[in-house]
Image (cartoon, rainbow, N blue to C red):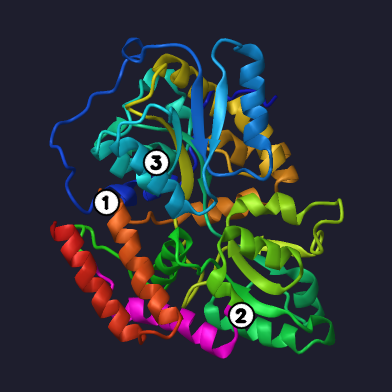
Amino acid sequence: MMQRRRDRRILVGLAFAATAAIALTGCSAPSTTESAPASEAELEGRGPIQYVSSPDASGAAQETIDAWNADNPDEQVTWVELPLDADQQRQQMVQNAQVEGSSYSVLNLDVVWTSEFAANRWITPLPEDALPLDEEIPATVEAASYRDTVYGAPYYTDGALLYSRTDLLSAAGVTEAPETWAEMQEACDAVLALPEAAGVSCYAGQFDKNEGLTVNFSEAVNSAGGSLFDADGEPTVDTPEALTALEFLVDGFESGMIPREAITYQEEQGRQAFQEGKLVFLRNWPYIYKSLSATDGSSSVQGKFGVSAIPGEDGPGVSTLGGRNIAISSFAENKATALDFIAFFTSREQEEARLALSSRAPVFSEFFEDEAVTANYPYLPTLLTSLDNAQPRPKVVQYGATTAAIQDEIYAALTGDKDPESALADLQDKLAEITAG
């Protein structure tokens, strides 16, 4: 195992992302009562618990659960597997919380859901002294907190990466990764003129009508110099910058730069398309690096791809801050077991083991600083660059309504049901109504 570093150095620049997250509080919580951090004594009960999460194709999370179960025969963890679609995951967790169901113990939450679940008291505060928070990337701790109280244990962090077919780019004489949208288009034009690029499309992200669309639109707006909300939590989507961003995506579908089938892409569909050699460029998360690098014959791009920061309008783009937190349902039984399992699940040792299996980016600063680690996972320095400038999605209590409004209007524009100007004007009105409420 990696030797623990006692100096606990913090990554330069990541505090910016934490500060930005505070600015986008959006709306007030349903309750004005402040919550104090829990003590371990307040989390009572020992016995079987349930881990509630999306599927994990890498098998890494299951290995951690198996390791826990082998050592804790009286406190077994059962995995409750939710759908792959993030919106469906959130919906099922919300429904369970609204009926105060005890069948969900430990929740794997998208970082942007944490404020909503904490504000509604669907998850319980965690004792900070039970977690090594001072050794973790500050932005990940902030993303796991609500009103200065920690409600989740940072699980992994995420920033967008641009995956590129370096073999095709080299054959076309393109030696540098694109930093702007125009450069990406020029690179694609050169590649697609090659005979060996027959049947290959230029670029894809996540454009299905789900959370991935909110992320991709947010990144496009930020990468064009705009924002979805201002520092006071007021929506700012009916702007020239947001229009530039949306027109980039709409024009991409109309011109064929983005293949028509990408309108159905979530993360996994995009990974499969790139892994099968169907794309020159793909915007996705770090977790797919492992699959793309597979040497068992499952990846047609093994040894033929590279990673870089996502492009923007006039220079490198701005990633969305992604990742997951692990929290305890307020209605769970056996909360003491749940806390111990969370501490085990998110420990340095387990994060190191999962990194080898899944390429999920760890939340401990030391991994990004260790040359032996970055030699094996060369995307980590690029990810750090992405995280340095990352912006959070709107950190609002009514996040479900906010992301649904974004998805409805942006999807309508991408599919041609609305022109970009009308979609943004309608989205501005919807978000203003949501934040006013």
Which numbered disc covers residue 259?
2
Q: Is residue 397 magenta?
A: no
Label 2 with label 1: CB-CB less than 8 Å: no
Residue type, mark 1 in image: Val
Q: Is residue 166 above or below residue 403?
A: below
Label 1, label 3: how far apart the Cα atoms are = 17 Å
- Give the mark count: 3
Q: Quadrant of the N terminus?
A: top right
Mark 2 element type: loop
Cα separation, mark 2 vs mark 1, equals 33 Å
Q: Residue at x 34, y 74 (%)?
A: 409
**Which of the two discs, 2 and 1, labels the residue nearer the N terminus?**
2
Return the x and y of residue 311 as percentages of the image width and height: 54, 71
Q: Residues within 10 Å of mark 3 (few under 14, many from 20)?
A: many
Which quadrant, please, contains the C terminus? bottom left
Q: Amino acid at mark 2?
A: Pro
Say which quarter of the image contains residue 106. top left
User: Left or right: where does residue 293 sit relative to residue 344?
Assistant: right
In the picture of the structure, the residue carrying the numbered disc 1 is: 396
Nearest to the observer: residue 266 or residue 177: 266
Give the amino acid at mark 3: Met
Q: Which residue is mark 3?
A: 93
Residue 239 inside the magenta-drawn segment: yes
User: Foreground mark, 3 or 2?
Assistant: 3
Q: Main secondary structure of the magenta part?
A: helix
Q: Which residue: 42% across, 69% down?
A: 217
Residue 349: image x %, image y %?
63, 25
Query: Of circles 2 and 1, which is in front?
Result: 2
Tell me residue 346's x, y (percent).
53, 29
